[in-house]
Image (cartoon, rainbow, N blue to C red):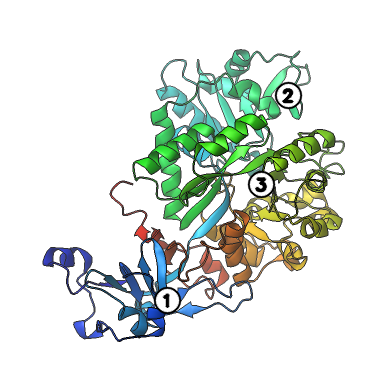
Amino acid sequence: MRTICSLMATALAASMLCPAQTAPQQSVPKRTNPAASSAQKQLAGTPELIFFNGVIYTGVGLAEDKPQIVEAIAIGGGKVLAIGKTADITRLAGPKTVLHDLDSARTKTFIFPGFNDAHTHLGSAGRTNLNVDLTGVKSLAEMLAKIKSAADVAPAGHWLTGGNWDHTLWVDKTLPTCQDLDKVTGDHPTFLDRIDGHISIANSSALTAAGITAKTRAPQGGAIDLDSHGEPTGILRESAQDLVYKVIPPPTLEERRKGDELAIKDALTHGVTSVQDFSDWDDFLVFEQMEKEGKLHLRISEWLPFKDPLPDLIKMRAHHDASDPLLHTGFLKGFMDGSLGSRTAAMKAPFADDPGNTGLPQYTQDQLNKMAVARAAAGFQLGFHAIGDKATSMALDAYSQPGISTTARNRIEHAQVVDPADIPRFKQLGVIASMQPNHLLTDMNWAVDRLGPKRAAYSYAWKAFLDAGVPLAFGTDYPVEPITPFRGLYAAVTRMNEAGTKTYYPENKLTRGQALYAYTQGSAYAEFAEKRKGKLIPGYEADFILVDRDLYRADARAILSTNVQQTFVAGHDALATPEQ
């Protein structure tokens, strides 16, 4: 991108803003100010920043695959002020306006609305980055080697936490055991999550610290795996994980903040300008402090735990200004079940590769209904994690209770496996399908084996939802999957693996416009923000990204290699701000 400086800038400012390859002065549109123009009629202030000579997707028309493209955009006060042709927009510049010549025809720089990730776990991502990160390990041996490296340098008795291991990537696909971990952990209690967060592995020291023995009963919705002798293997499923979590020393404030800052930077680096997040309350307090210091550059809607007592939820909601466009609390997140990878998703029939196992529902229907009605009556939007078809049906049954509005924009997170008869119920009940297309890239390697072909045909059924009139909101489930939105876009429009060698029920793939819409405006709709986010039109938040390829027209495989050149939030380069 070539940058053209304000004519009134000082020589020093010019040397900072104008690279050596700046276009000749005659290529800069003249700063004339005619009495009236269509662009001026849009204007609500003097622009601080103008991009011109570009290919700028405003977001208008994406859902219909008739995207609006403009040449120029004016930014001021954190908002989009005007869009249109280069000649019209550049003449709006004032003496302090910074002009940026995108020169898209030659530089391959394109502007799109910033991505809104509808499902993240920033706190978890940050702590994984700071602890034992087992993302992508290809064998038990590699996993143990990484754990040993961490144990060798940790202070005596220090807990080893983190995780993100995935045994489905291993040749034998066998779960690790506490005895495996004991070989390398020494005196360190160790508790490491599987990549989906629905099962974890503990070493013997951690089991002892939690008081888990052969006689320990798992809490409702959980399971403690036992070996052939009736002894714990170290694998704890779903709510049984809490038995260990409650005895792990919490991170210090400094550790938590460092992790949160790393996760936020990761999001911004990949073109994500907003997230809808489920982290600990202490993480929210960190975000709040960062905002007070002027160091929060990512928009965050923070979910609250559905299972918490209602009076506590009301207090948390009142703690922060709900109208704050940068940070606020959002819906109540509840868990109906676990995951496919750990075989804890609640299914109507057993897993095809594990007869007799139908997963682990976290509530009875009666419990769920009563809690949902009470929280809806208190004015909360609800969102239920549901992976299996039984879990989704339970969530829909709860949403169908008298007293729960069809206009509340309640959500089902994931909706990975759905009974075809339940898809129309989403529309009838006004429920949003909040989905993560990138999960398919991981799960397609074993999903048919786990589900059988009949159920697999209605898994990750994005197009079936759209065809039924169900709103889609896209995200990543970071750090379960990387936060880059480009893997999700690729998966949504191809339903192929990243190598391009395997396809998964292609009848459910989306068009390019539908996928981009779900990742921007669809996500904004899911958080009641569609009138201020997701499009680059006058009055909307100036949240946008500069990328090195045309995401709408580029070859699908090329999407995976997209480079984000800059990420703007409220009209400011979110990664260039000195405070970050």
Q: Is residue 334 left or right of residue 490?
A: right
- Residue flagged by tag 1: what amino acid is it? Gln
453 or 259, which lies in front? 259
47 or 287, which lies in front? 47
- Residue flagged by tag 2: what amino acid is it? Ile
Residue at 30 percent of width and 86 percent of height:
34
Q: CA distance from mark 1 to mark 3?
A: 34 Å
Residue at 76 percent of width and 64 percent of height:
464
Q: Residue furthest left?
A: 11
Above or below for 490 versus 475: below
> Which badge, 1 or 3, comes first in the chain's sequence?
1
Disc number lying in front (2 or 1): 1
Q: Residue furthest front?
A: 35
Q: Is residue 350 left or right of residue 170?
A: right
In the picture of the structure, the residue carrying the numbered disc 2 is 224
> Which badge, 3 or 2, comes first in the chain's sequence?
2
45 or 114, which lies in front? 45
Q: Position of residue 322 (x, y in %)?
A: 53, 46
Q: Is residue 423 left or right of residue 250?
A: right
User: Of helix, strand and loop, which one carries label 2?
Assistant: strand
User: Of helix, strand and loop, which one carries label 1?
Assistant: helix
User: Of helix, strand and loop, which one carries label 3?
Assistant: loop
Q: CA distance from mark 2 to mark 1?
A: 62 Å
In the picture of the structure, the residue carrying the numbered disc 1 is 42
In the picture of the structure, the residue carrying the numbered disc 3 is 381
